[in-house]
Amino acid sequence: MVLPPEIREDLLIHIKGNQISVENDYMSVESGVLLANIVHVAIQNGWQGVEYLSGIPGTVGGAVVGNAGAYGRSISDVVDSVEIWDRGNVRVISKSDCMFSYRDSVFKKEPWIVLRINLKFGSGSRNKLKAVSEEITAQRKNKYKDDLKCPGSFFKNIVIQTLNPIQLKAIDQAKIISGKLPVGYLLESVGAKGMRIGDIAVSDFHANLLINLGKGTYKDVSVLVDLLKQKVKKKFGIRLEEEIRYF
Ligand SMILES: Cc1cc2nc3c(=O)[nH]c(=O)nc-3n(C[C@H](O)[C@H](O)[C@H](O)COP(=O)(O)OP(=O)(O)OC[C@H]3O[C@@H](n4cnc5c(N)ncnc54)[C@H](O)[C@@H]3O)c2cc1C
């Protein structure tokens, strides 16, 4: 994690805190806890709300910053409050102050460090939750081979409400899922699969995955990304926005 320039430009912090405490249907977790561990503990307790996040790599801190999610669900569904470090002060902010939206949050805009997250779950059937989690984990294992060098979905799916009538006319409405248009459909429609700049390529099985074939550079990424954005803009009039962050 890179702290804002007013502190020290070259400071990198690795959050290690990985304590989980549970009480009733609440879980209080330090931000260094892996999201996978939270999914595991929630399912063990028959708690509903994160089973669809099975297989998403990274920590709960990173998940909260990007409001990570899948299958129309997000970590924000179960966030109750968040403890932050804000320029030397530690305080707790409410869920509404996190300003969560699709793959976005206040944490992308403020130089805060997420220290701890308080989560509140619904109750569910442990076996059903486990079955959902196993199904999703198997699908993801198929999609994301272990040696695949990629940062996950590269561009954000398109929120349908943001499209104007001309843009709506240009897309296949049958592709819309839970109010969003999979960006993979747009990229596939402009022939993105297999496109390559240097050692960075669009995967040939999922058009919203950019993979590093070995010696890919930032330059390769930025040239390919510009090309993809231009092609989608030209065909659909839609501006793509990255889900990943550049550092
Ligand atoms: C194969 C693969 C599949 C993926 N699938 C999905 C998916 O289905 N859905 C999805 O939403 N994402 C997905 N991702 C993206 C990734 O898993 C998430 O973005 C994840 O939440 C990142 O967590 P991290 O701990 O690795 O964060 P990092 O990548 O280390 O950090 C992400 C951002 O959060 C900031 N940050 C991290 N921790 C803190 C903290 N404690 N306080 C303040 N800022 C912090 C960092 O500075 C950085 O800006 C995938 C990634 C990969 C590689």
Image (cartoon, rainbow, N blue to C red):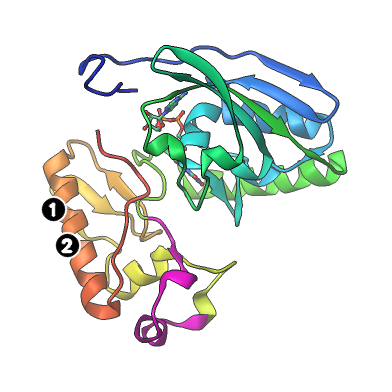
Label 2 Cα crowd, 10 Å radius (few <14 / some 14-19 / many 20+): some
The residue drawn where x is 47% and y is 48% is 103
As helix, strand or loop, the secondary structure at mark 1 comes to: helix
Which residues fall within the magenta stretch?
156-173
Instruction: Classify residue 107 as left or right of residue 22.
Output: left
Return the x and y of residue 44 as percentages of the image width and height.
Answer: 80, 29
Label 1 Cα crowd, 10 Å radius (few <14 / some 14-19 / many 20+): some
Return the x and y of residue 186 as percentages of the image width and height.
Answer: 36, 71
In depth, the one of 174 and 93 nearer the eye is 93
Disc 1 to disc 2: CB gap under 8 Å: yes
Would residue 172 be counted in the magenta stretch?
Answer: yes
In depth, the one of 75 and 81 nearer the eye is 81
Would residue 115 be counted in the magenta stretch?
Answer: no
Query: Which quadrant of the frame does ligand 1 lie within?
Result: top left
Which residue matches tag 2? 227
Tell me: residue 151, above or below residue 159.
Answer: above
As helix, strand or loop, the secondary structure at mark 2 comes to: helix
Q: What residue type is labelled 1?
A: Val
The residue drawn where x is 60% and y is 57% is 72
Q: Which mark is residue 223?
A: 1
